[in-house]
Amino acid sequence: MNRVASYPDGHWSLAVDIPYSMGVMQGGLIFTSGQADLIDKGEVCNPGDLSKQTAAAIKHIKSIFSDLGSDIEQLTKLTVFYVNNGSVDQQAYKTEIAKILDTRNMPVVAMVPLTHFFYPGTMVEIDAVGVNDKGARHYVNNSDYGPVSEGFSQALRSGEFIFLGGTTAQAACGEIADPNDSVQQTHLALERIEKILGEFGADRRDLVKLNNWFVIGANAKEWSQSAQVRADFYHEPGPVATGMPLHSLGAEGVCISTDCWGMLAGDGSRIDKHRAWPEGHWDWPVHLPFKHGLKCRDYMFVGGQVSMDQTAEIIDPHSLDLQTARSMQNVEKVLAEFGADNNDILKLNTWYKGVNDPDRDGDTLHASVNIRSSYFSKPGPASTGIPLENLCYENLLTETEVIAYRASK
């Protein structure tokens, strides 16, 4: 299936020229770049107004799906990056998002609270994934697995794809199990993931991609405690993974949230997976079962790539520019293991350490995006870049993950 790229007429742009597409469709999957309430040259509309910006971002997503020849009913997952200083009721906000979406289907959602964005006044950026398949969908919404939100499912299956939204240790009533205990909450979240997968006849071995969000200090010791729990849970070789520290997960006491993808054949059988770990590639400070790359069917998933060596030492610890370039080079190395390259990338997600300074954050974004952009030509992949207070390790300044597709000959 040929790739289709979208950049609707009159759509917003950043203050610097980029080769990315606003949306990409290939192999049945649809990806959008992170959508925000902007106009030309990165000008922010409705500054500080979360509700109006959310409505605008969703309107942009609908426009992109339509431009790709699909529609919003094919939406399967949202990742909502939004500013929350403690004043936003996350459950109420999810309900608001569902009403704005106004779809018959029940996508999953991952909520990611931030302290700030790259352009002052920006309150939200929303990523969307769709499966362009009008076949039957199967949903999981069970209060045993945590809060049930109107308009969203906890998990859904569309064709061979299984999507799980943000899974935490929070009970349906809002009570937090083991408040602020990352290890115990990780155990509980992983148990829930296994049970949810079981609703589709799948298990942890069918996962291809994880995103772990946690409220933990930005140092290797604190990160490694919950990472070890995950290491004991997943079979080796495991899926690809990306982990990011946050200041909050939207509810006091919640410190772990995991959203993930799985793939399972239509007859319920397990799909063959091929994994990549280039020779001499960087490694974590503790042994983990995750691999840098995983190929399932014609899709390639690359876990978060960083500027690190085999002994988990940061390379170029004080240079965002050099770390960004090395992260992209590491992405290329992983894709090469599958006989693929940057031209096969459908979606690029980058997190970088922001400075939370209205006069400088735009410059930080532009420095990062200009280097990443140099690896692509128009029409490039869909792309999202998000500033964080910290990354997993001290002096780590950026991390990039990708999803790619190359049709088998």
Image (cartoon, rainbow, N blue to C red):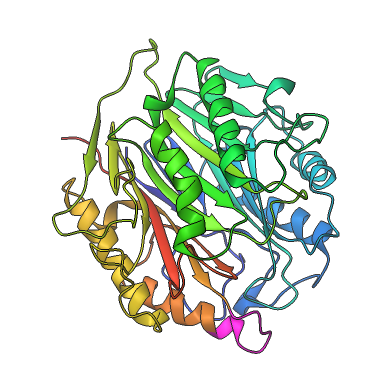
Closest to the observer: 49 or 42? 49
**In the rendered image, which quarter is residue 359 located in?**
bottom right
On screen, residue 128 versus residue 264, left or right, reads right
Q: Does residue 187 appear anywhere in the picture?
A: yes
Q: Is residue 258 above or below residue 137?
A: below
Residue 317 in percent (x, y) is at 38, 79
Prevailing secondary structure class for the magenta stretch in the rendered image = loop
Say which residue appears at 67% left-offset and 25% top-offset: 145
Residue projecting furthest to the bottom: 359
Say if the magenta span includes residue 81: no
Q: In percent of the image, x 47 and y 59: which residue is there?
A: 221
| Quarter of the figure that contains the N terminus | top left
Residue 33 in the image, given as x and y percentages of width and height: 53, 57
- Which region shows up in magenta? 355-363
Residue 33 visible in the displayed image: no
Q: Is 364 in front, or is 103?
A: 364
User: Which residue extends farthest top?
Assistant: 267
Q: The C terminus lies in which quarter of the figure? A: top left
Up-down: is 384 above or below 16?
above
Which residue appears at 64% of the width and 40% of the height?
109
Q: Relative to 160, say whether 86 is above or below.
A: below
